[in-house]
Amino acid sequence: MPLRRTYIDIKVDGKNRLTNATPLNEFGATSIAGSFLDIIASESDRIYSDIEYLHRSLDPTRNYGIELDNLGYLLGIKRNAAYTALDDSLTNFNFYIDKRTNMTAAQLINNLYPGNNVMRQRLAQAGFIDNANNPTKITLPRGIQIFNPNKSILYTTLNPTIISNNTPNAYTGVIASATGAFSNVQSHVLVKHDLANEFLLRDIAKFILCTNNFPIQTGNNGMTDADYRYKITTAPQARNTNELTIRQTILAIPGIRNVYFQRGKYGYGTYSVIIEGTSPLVSEGLLNLVQQRINNLDGNDAAFIYAPEYRGIEMSFNIFVEIGFDADQVRENARDAIINYINNIPVGGTIIWNDVITLLGNITGIQDFIVDYFKIGEYNPFQKLNKKQIVLRTINQRSYDNQKFYTDRGLIKICTRQG
């Protein structure tokens, strides 16, 4: 930008030039020469102001709010909007009959309404069961509100769901009631519903449970001015390389922790991407969202999007607790510490056994411990089962580049002894 000259600078300089080059010597406010100098100085000062404004409007570091949005619009770079947490896959959130009843859909209706043809007919007419005389299905309507135990996070179901004798788990898509990252949840958080508010289903609702098998991490608070400036300034270099564009596109999606890129896995013109989430398990809904964003990029090769292969870790310990400490609390602290350590190991990472020893040794109240077993298996996140386990020695264990270690409370066994 040119160095700005003020109104006074221009007028004084003009006066000096006219005095040196012409016989003019009267520059008062009512003189002709003074009036011309005033016009020239005023208009020149206004031009400098316009130039300064244009220069400032093209500088991301000097713009805020709507002005920054206008600059982004001019450059074809949009601010990332706030997103509502959503999972429209049919593998995550589901309703099911309380397994403690050991009943199918038909048995539940028959036990609740034995011989009550009037109630069954009303349920059938409303579409909640398929047959008044011989029901085999329970249909739950769309729009059911689901929430966490204290009802601080609310979601709504997107589709009707059918619980039948053959499909005891009724899956449906869900969407958060509020926009932003606050509605993001970990696994098994959405465990309550308002099904009892439906008058005809009030008896059935007592026996219907629900849960989300995977985390839902697609909510986002939107891009701040600082983040938007960074996006604008890095956009030109992002366009210089296709792989960088792909990485930045994926990493901009809420719930993504890292991206592992492999070109040409299935031949020329293909690449595969392994997604590591901010939560240890990656849902199908998040993978679908990544696939959609990648498909929207121009000129890309064929993309294959995957979650890591999960290697389930099972451990069992006997822990000796110092006298005076709460053994139950020490056990929970030890279990939580091990789970956090295992699940935070990145894709392709290594379990360092000395870290596990140090971890337990640093927990207040643990006097000593003995390892009963250390196993690794093929973890199925849909069935929540760790299969084909093998017993390992207590030495470092490394995962492959497409694998991630995973464990949960059901896989870590801890027994405590006082003294």
Image (cartoon, rainbow, N blue to C red):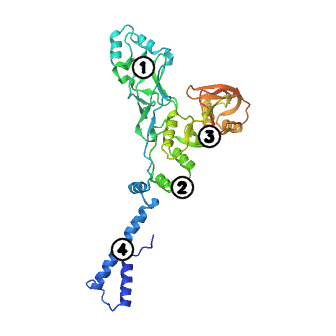
Sooner in the amino-acid sequence: mark 3 or mark 1:
1
Q: Amino acid at mark 2?
A: Gln
Q: Amino acid at mark 1?
A: Lys
| CB-based contact (under 8 Å), mark 1 and mark 4 | no
Label 3 – label 1 distance at C-alpha: 53 Å
Q: Residue 301 placed where, x, y %?
A: 55, 43
Say which mark, if any, is on residue 45: 4
Disc 1 on helix, strand or loop?
loop
Label 2 – label 4 distance at C-alpha: 37 Å
Sooner in the amino-acid sequence: mark 3 or mark 4:
4
Label 1 – label 4 distance at C-alpha: 77 Å
Q: Which residue is mark 1?
A: 206
Q: Which residue is mark 3?
A: 267
| CB-based contact (under 8 Å), mark 3 and mark 1 | no
Q: Which residue is mark 2?
A: 237
Disc 2 on helix, strand or loop?
helix
Locate the C terminus and report the quarter of the image it occupies: top right
| Labels 2, 4: front one | 2
Disc 4 on helix, strand or loop?
helix
Frontmost residue, 358 versus 142: 142
Frontmost residue, 200 versus 173: 173
Q: Amino acid at mark 3?
A: Gly
Within 10 Å of disc 4 (Cα), the crowding (few <14, some 14-19, many 20+) is: some
Sooner in the amino-acid sequence: mark 2 or mark 4:
4
Q: Is residue 59 left or right of residue 36?
A: right
Sooner in the amino-acid sequence: mark 3 or mark 2:
2
| Labels 1, 4: front one | 4
Label 3 – label 4 distance at C-alpha: 63 Å
Q: Amino acid at mark 4?
A: Asp
Quadrant position of residue 307: top right
